[in-house]
């Protein structure tokens, strides 16, 4: 089995925790770190729990810098998963491949999943296995799954032949073209695509083991405990792996308090994970930046500039390296375009204000306007100015 995960350097401590947990139970499995960043100071692969680093430059994506520029950090780390799987699946002797998100930790063996791949060709884990009854839980979990994807692509496994390879190639192509966080358009990075997978691939199996991909979105129905040997259990079965999603921004802990506030072992699990991360360098300054998050001069890349570059072929041809600040540069074009948009918006706003003002004056001059209204208008103008009066009249209208 070949296992891989996808990160930038901010997730390196998490990837170390994951890799070590994989090696604890499967020392013979090969672990590949898919990396889309520059390496931090002092990085030495020989001292790491990874067998190999596969960089974005090595994926064979045409004009990869221009392609990468069109993605936010989350979009890029998910977009490369498909092309990497396709590349790794071609290696001699690799019959099965598994992806695991970096913010996951194994707590038990995954041998049964490897065995499942002898019968099935693709494995996916759904976010939910239980029907929600509470209206808040329906909104937080079921509606969220409808928006973000039925299956959590923090995990997948597949054979590197037959339908398994077909799935990998299909998914990789979709991610190269359409890996975006654009829920209104029906896309959420790599996940929404796999809602279609069970219809396309008859060899796909849904993993219903309750110990797999336990997370805050399903923990209310998966009570954690421990046996006499200190092994974590989920509803009486071994905890296979836990997904510590949204650990850094605090949302994960918020959801844990909402749906598992009385689950003592769930909090023990989170506290233990926090200690694991600190031991691997979580929070250190050298892990806090993203090389592809800025232009060559150090200026941050706005999300809007990425999106317009991604959808406009003329800009891609004019600026094949959008990170460059050598003129003519995409950065200069973007700044000029942004300035023009602001000027246009200001002019439109001015036209609207003048139109409203004209209507106000016409209205005040009308004989139908009572003296009390005029007195109130004058009072507002004294305290809030002319545009304060306009704003009040507009809001009233």
Image: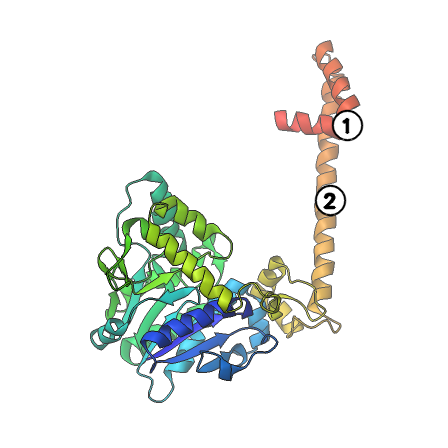
Element under disc 1: helix
User: In screen coordinates, is 328 left or right of 267?
Assistant: right
Residue under pointer 2: 346
Furthest toward the left, the residue is 119
Furthest toward the top, the residue is 371
Residue 334's x, y, as percent? 69, 61
**Residue 325 found in image quarter:** bottom right
Q: Quadrant of the N terminus?
A: bottom left
Question: Sequence-wise, which precedes: disc 2 or disc 1?
Answer: 2
Q: Could you tell me if residue 216 is visible in this image?
A: no
**Residue 51 found in image quarter:** bottom left
In front of the other: 392 or 317: 392
Query: What is the spatial separation of the Cα atoms under label 2 and label 1, in whole angstroms?
Result: 18 Å
Residue under pointer 1: 386
Contact (Cβ within 8 Å) of mark 2 with mark 1: no
Furthest toward the front, the residue is 228
Q: Quadrant of the C terminus?
A: top right
Residue 180's x, y, as percent? 49, 61
**Residue 388 found in image quarter:** top right
Using the image, determine if residue 35 lies above or below residue 146: below
Q: Could you tell me if residue 15 is visible in this image?
A: yes
Element under disc 2: helix
In front of the other: 331 or 263: 263
Question: What number is the disc on residue 242?
Answer: none
Furthest toward the bottom, the residue is 92
User: In screen coordinates, is 90 left or right of 13?
Assistant: left
User: In screen coordinates, is 351 left or right of 272?
Assistant: right
- Residue at 71%, 20% (x, y): give it: 363
Density class for disc 1 (Cα within 10 Å; few <14, some 14-19, many ≥20) is some
């Amino acid at each position: 089995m070949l296992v891989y995960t996808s990160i930038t350097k901010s997730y390196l401590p998490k990837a170390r925790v994951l890799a070590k947990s994989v090696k604890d139970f499967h020392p013979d499995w090969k672990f590949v770190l898919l990396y889309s960043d520059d390496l931090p100071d002092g990085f030495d692969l020989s001292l790491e729990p990874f067998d190999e680093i596969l960089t974005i430059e090595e994926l064979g994506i045409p004009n990869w810098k221009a392609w990468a520029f069109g993605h936010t950090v989350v979009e890029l780390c998910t977009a490369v998963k498909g092309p990497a799987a396709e590349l790794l699946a071609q290696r001699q002797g690799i019959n099965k491949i598994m992806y695991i998100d970096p913010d996951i930790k194994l707590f038990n063996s995954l041998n049964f999943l490897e065995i499942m791949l002898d019968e099935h060709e693709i494995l996916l884990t759904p976010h939910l296995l239980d029907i929600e009854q509470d209206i808040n839980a329906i909104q937080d979990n079921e509606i969220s799954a409808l928006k973000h994807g039925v299956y959590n692509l923090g995990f997948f496994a597949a054979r590197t032949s037959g339908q398994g390879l077909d799935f990998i190639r299909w998914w990789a192509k979709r991610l190269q073209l359409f890996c975006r966080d654009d829920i209104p358009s029906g896309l959420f990075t790599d996940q929404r695509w796999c809602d279609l997978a069970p219809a396309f691939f008859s060899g796909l199996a849904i993993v219903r083991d309750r110990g797999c991909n336990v997370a805050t979105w399903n923990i209310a129905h998966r009570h954690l405990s421990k046996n006499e040997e200190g092994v974590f259990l989920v509803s009486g079965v071994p905890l296979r792996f836990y997904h510590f999603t949204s650990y850094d921004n605090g949302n994960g802990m918020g959801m844990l308090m909402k749906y598992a506030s009385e689950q003592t072992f769930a909090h023990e699990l989170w506290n233990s994970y926090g200690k694991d991360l600190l031991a691997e360098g979580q929070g250190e300054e050298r892990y806090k930046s993203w090389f592809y998050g800025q232009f060559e001069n150090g200026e941050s890349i706005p999300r809007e500039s990425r999106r317009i570059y991604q959808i406009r072929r003329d800009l891609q041809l004019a600026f094949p390296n959008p990170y460059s600040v050598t003129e003519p540069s995409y950065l200069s074009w973007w700044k000029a375009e942004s300035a023009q948009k602001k000027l246009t918006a200001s002019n439109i706003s001015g036209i609207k204000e003048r139109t409203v003002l004209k209507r106000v004056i016409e209205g005040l001059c009308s004989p139908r306007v009572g003296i009390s209204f005029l007195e109130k208008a004058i009072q507002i103008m004294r305290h809030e100015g002319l545009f304060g009066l306009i704003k009040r009249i507009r809001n009233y209208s």
